[in-house]
Image (cartoon, rainbow, N blue to C red):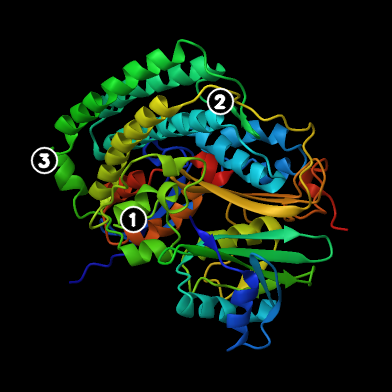
Amino acid sequence: MTLETEPVVLNMGPQHPSTHGVFRMRVTFDGEVIVDFEPVFGYLHRGIEKLAEHKTYLQNMPYTDRLDYVASMSNNWAYALAVEKLAGIEVPERAEYLRVIMGELMRLSSHLVGVGALFNDMGAFMTPFLYMYREREKILDLFDMVCGQRLTYNYMRFGGVSHDIPEEFMPTLRRFIDDMPRYIDEYDRLLAENEIVLARSKGVGILPAEKAINASVSGPVLRGSGVKWDLRKNNPYSIYDRFDFDIPTGTVGDVYDRYRVRVEEMRQSVRIVKQAMEQIPQGEVRTRVPTPLKPPPGEAYASVEAPKGELGFYLVSDGGAKPYRFKIRAPSFINLTILRDLVMGWKLADAIIIFGSIDICMGEVDR
Amino acid sequence: MTKTLSGAEVARQIGEPLPDAVTGSDDTTVFVRSEAILDAARFLKEYLDFDYLVSITAIDFNDHFDVVYHLRSLKNNYGVVLRTRCDDRQSPSVPSVVSLWQGADLQEREVYDLMGISFDGHPNMKRIVLWDGYEGHPLRKDFILDVPGGGKAT
């Protein structure tokens, strides 16, 4: 006698602890093996691109905070860069250094969340996550000191930053940056060679380099596959050409490599912040720009290496005070392109850590 | 630093195998006829090493749409902008480039969803952030924010 079998469709999410926000995975199983997969999203779609066409350039700055809300500084920065390119605005030296310091602290903070959440997905429930949140709190305190906000900073302006850092910022940052490598060592002692971590993540969800490039993947996911591409090195915006740092890459492109790339990037960010603290000059932090800002007709695309990948803004101006077209190249959204290919043939528990290793933020996916 | 290839130079190179494809160029951009976009993109990918599709987007100019492709070569670290014009407002469409770059998959669906331009040859051309059955395409200029559902198309 033969048993009749048929594939089972399972909806995971939009409310599910492993989906990192309101994201739905429509998974088809043959037994335990995934044979089809469809990501479903849009639950957080607020139409930011449309709203932005109805607001002045400056009014749009706080909206960028609400894209990848785990890395708001990077969003501010990318948008400011695009407007500065469009309107031809110069940024003072001190402001460039402040931007680099904030951008790298943001990367540390975002990677702490990304890696911590990945371990949650692996089943190390909350322990690694809270260890990493301990350091993230310190970064958020630093941001709080600078701009009075812990999540939506709205700190950058066209031609600089909104205001200079307070006196107590540098000593606090110094203490944090001196301690941070020790904490990263601590995470590694706990996790990097942990047998369960290795068993769960080595060889799982392999993304070959060629496929990664073809699917427009960026950030740690691209570098995890061994592609040495980082906009800070390959297209050094701001003042990144003045710092000495390495681009960590993976070798096979599995979940473990993506995790390791994030950890190594944290170490590099510490290096960059250290150098920036030594080099930062005194002076102005903002160029005066006309209000409302009316960039000449034209278009500009500018992008930064945000923690999750290449975050770009493409702006089209018709000469008015509001952008004619405001397009966000969101890394979380585009990195999802590859998810279906990665999870095919794996089991559900693997699909969850593969998804976790891409590290997305729904605010940025849905916009 | 990522070099921006001169649009005129890239246009000249595309023009050799595809004499009718290019309609114009400027410092950064090559303008291509919409029917020729797939051939032009294939040429750029195969002969000029544009292995990475940075982004696809569309702009509504009221009387026509522009579809804009930001291309980059990770191998040679240079970029160029490919741009095509779509005059049909009722049912605009351009050929899909998913067969060349998988990265176009979700992005073309997003353009379809929000701007209403469909991509011929896309394996799964349906809405992505809005739900099936939603009327209208919000990023079009005739979609009015004050009116629920965006008002009637003019």
x then y, percent, for residue A146: 52, 18
**Circle 2 or circle 1, nearest the eye:** 1
Image vertical order of residue A118 relative to residue A2, above or below? above
Chain identity of mark 2: A
In this view, which residue lies farthest toward the top?
A168
The residue that disc 1 covers is A228
Picture mark count: 3
**Circle 3 or circle 2, nearest the eye:** 2
Chain identity of mark 3: A
Would you say the residues marked 3 and 2 are in contact, meaning their CB atoms lie under 8 Å apart?
no
Residue at left offset 50%, top offset 64%: B78
Local secondary structure at mark 1: loop
What whole-number distance in Å separates the C-alpha atoms at marks 1 and 3?
A: 28 Å
Q: Quadrant of residue A321?
A: top right
Q: Residues within 10 Å of mark 3 (few under 14, many from 20)?
A: few
Q: Amino acid at mark 1?
A: Lys
Q: Amino acid at mark 2?
A: Tyr
Of callouts 1 and 3, the N-terminal one? 3
x then y, percent, for residue A296: 78, 48
**Circle 1 or circle 3, nearest the eye:** 1
Residue at left offset 62%, top offset 24%: A162
